[in-house]
Image (cartoon, rainbow, N blue to C red):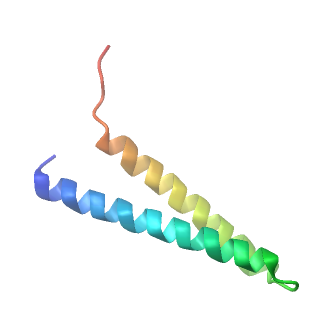
């Protein structure tokens, strides 16, 4: 993996983490509201899970395989 590609991947990872944190805050605020949209809340939670999966996948690609 070349250095430019590595930098782009790390930028993407930072962006995904930020979006994940923002969704976490938005979900928490929505849950606190007395009347919240269950459908929207479900979609936000689903997106948050998808982001987590993508973050974990990218992180696994950045860590070199260690042959024991």
Image point (27%, 34%), residue name? 64
Furthest toward the right, the residue is 34
Image point (12%, 52%), residue name? 3
Image quadrant containing the C terminus = top left
The percent position of residue 33, horizontal first and vertical second, equals 81, 83
Q: Is residue 1 left or right of residue 47?
A: left
Number of disc labels = 0
Q: Is residue 29 left or right of residue 4?
A: right
Image point (55%, 73%), residue name? 22
Q: Is residue 7 left or right of residue 46?
A: left
Locate residue 21: give its quadrant. Answer: bottom right
Furthest toward the top, the residue is 68
Q: Relative to residue 6, is residue 14 depicted above or below?
A: below
Image point (49%, 71%), residue name? 19
Q: Relative to residue 6, is residue 31 depicted above or below?
A: below
The percent position of residue 36, horizontal first and vertical second, equals 82, 83
The percent position of residue 65, horizontal first and vertical second, equals 30, 29
Q: Is residue 45 left or right of residue 1?
A: right
The percent position of residue 38, horizontal first and vertical second, equals 81, 77
């Amino acid at each position: 993996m070349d250095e430019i590609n590595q930098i782009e991947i790390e930028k993407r990872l930072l962006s995904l983490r930020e979006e994940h944190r923002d969704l976490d805050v938005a979900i928490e605020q929505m849950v606190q509201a007395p009347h919240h949209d269950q459908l929207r809340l479900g979609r936000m939670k689903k997106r948050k899970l998808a982001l987590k999966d993508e973050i974990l996948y990218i992180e696994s690609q950045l860590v070199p395989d260690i042959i024991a």
